Amino acid sequence: MKTYVKTTARNFQMSDTLRAVDFASRAHEDQRRKKSDVPYIYHPLNMACHALSMGIREDAVIAAILLHDVIEDCQMTADELPVSDEAKRIVLLVSHVKTDEANREKIMDAYYDAIGKDPKAALVKCIDRCNNLTTMSWGLSRDRIYRMISETEKYYPRLLKTIKSTVEYDDAAWLLQYQIESMLDIYKRLM
């Protein structure tokens, strides 16, 4: 995956992406996906491959995909990210602070409201959710799976609508909608 992302980034002169892939690899170096031995970097790399395979070639978007969890999970700031201000802005939009259950709904409403106003951030977040839906069966408790299903049903239709309103993302929006709805349907039938 890393080779594919780097080769594509070189071919399309995506300098932010080239810097982001190595930076994210170092930042997530000792991390693993929940309840597994899978290196964490596979998650953002898989997301970048997903976006590239849908024809997304915007440097800031692919770089933001690669860095989307660095602020949350690696105790870094946006200023430390070796990418353009646009990529940093997207990463900041899709990053959120941990919260307790008492404040969760209020914080998540504001978080998704901000993302829903930005097609690039909405695209990154939907690709993230697609990837997380495909791996949640082995990484999350039953309660967390229910929460993710509910959260997806509540917030993602708006994000998909934002993506669909951007002509260059129209194909990606339909593919993401299909993938998200299919995964939700499978999980709801199995739960």
Image (spheres, helix red, strand yellow):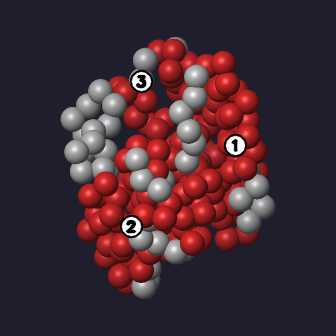
* Residue occupying image coordinates x 68% and y 34%: 107
**Which numbered disc covers residue 112?**
1
* Identity, as a three-letter code, of the amino acid under mark 2: Ala
Sequence-wise, which precedes: disc 1 or disc 2? 2
* Identity, as a three-letter code, of the amino acid under mark 1: Tyr
SS for dot 2: helix
* Residue occupying image coordinates x 32% and y 37%: 33
* Identity, as a three-letter code, of the amino acid under mark 3: Leu
SS for dot 3: loop
Sequence-wise, which precedes: disc 2 or disc 3? 2
Query: In the image, is residue 187 above or below residue 6?
Result: above
The picture quadrant where one finds residue 104 is top right
Q: Which residue is mark 2?
A: 20
How far apart are labels 3 and 1 at the CA level? 21 Å
SS for dot 1: helix
Q: Position of residue 68 (x, y in %)?
A: 48, 53
Q: Which residue is mark 3?
A: 140
* Residue occupying image coordinates x 36% and y 72%: 19
